[in-house]
Amino acid sequence: MKEIRKARKERDYKPAKFKKNIGAYYDPYLAKGGPHEMAICKKCHAIYHKKRWFFDEAVYKETIDKKTSQKVLCPACQKIKDKFPGGIVTLKGDFIKDKGKRDEILNLAKNEDSLAKGINPLERIIEIRKTASEINITTTNEKLAQRIGRAIYKAFKGKVRYNWSHDVKLLRVEWEK
C-alpha cells in the first residue's frame, strides 16, 4: 500500500490551471422550479411536463384548450427572442465561397438542428448570418454548436477548433477550409 502511495506522489502530472464546474453554472433562462403543472410554449408548441421539455403535436392539440396548462415561452424561444447564444459556429475560408458547398454546409447544419430538436427541444439554431467569406451560426446551447462543428468537420475535413469559455457555458467553434 505504501508503494502505491509513493508511486502516486512521484507521478509527473500537472493539473489544469482552472477547472470548469459545469454543475455550478446557472442558466437564467431555465426556471429554477419550472412551471407547476403542464406548460405549453406559445411559439414552438413545446410541452413542459414532469420536469422536462418535449415535442408532441398530439399532446399539444389535446391540452391547448385546457385551462390547467400554462401558456409560456420555453427557454429556447426566450433565448432566440433575446439573441442569447450558448454556442457560436464560425465557418471561414475559400471553401465557403463556392455556392454549392455553402448550401451543403448549411443543409448539414440545419439537419443537425432538426436531429437535436428531436432529442432536446431546447437545442436550436438562433440565427445564421452569411457574408461573402464566412458564415456565423449561433445556437441556444453549446452542445448543438459542438455537434454542428463535428458534423461539418466529418463531412468536409478542414481545421476545426473548439474554444470553451471558462466562466459561462459558451462554446466558440471555428472551422476553416
Image (cartoon, rainbow, N blue to C red):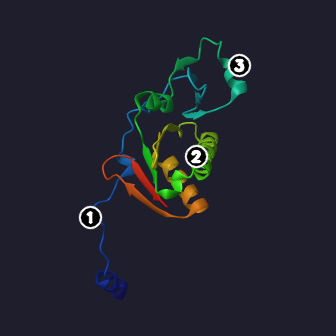
- Between 117 and 56, the one nearer to me in the picture: 117
x and y percent of residue 75 in the render? 48, 31
In the figure, is residue 144 to the left or right of 103? left
Residue shown at 43%/55% (left/top)?
174
Q: Secondary structure at mark 3?
A: helix
**How far is disc 2 from disc 3 in space, using C-alphas?**
35 Å
- Between 138 and 69, the one nearer to me in the picture: 138
Question: What residue sits right under mark 3 in the picture?
Answer: 62
Residue furthest out toward the left: 17
In the figure, is residue 177 to the left or right of 5? right
Q: Earlier in the sequence, mark 2 or mark 3?
A: 3
Residue 6 drawn above or below residue 63: below
x and y percent of residue 142 in the render? 46, 47
Residue shown at 39%/47% (left/top)?
170
Q: Dot 2, crowdedness within 10 Å: few (<14), some or many (≥20)?
A: some
**How far is disc 1 from disc 3 in space, using C-alphas?**
53 Å
x and y percent of residue 123 in the render? 53, 40
Q: Dot 1, crowdedness within 10 Å: few (<14), some or many (≥20)?
A: few
Give the foreground label among 2 and 1: 2
Question: What residue sits right under mark 1 in the picture?
Answer: 17
Question: What residue sits right under mark 2 in the picture?
Answer: 106
Residue 153 drawn above or below residue 52: below
Residue 34 drawn above or below residue 68: below
Q: Secondary structure at mark 1?
A: loop
**How far is disc 2 from disc 1 in space, using C-alphas?**
37 Å
Residue shown at 50%/53% (left/top)?
146
Residue type, numbered disc 3: Glu
Quadrant of res 49: top right
- Between 142 and 9, the one nearer to me in the picture: 142
Give the foreground label among 2 and 3: 2
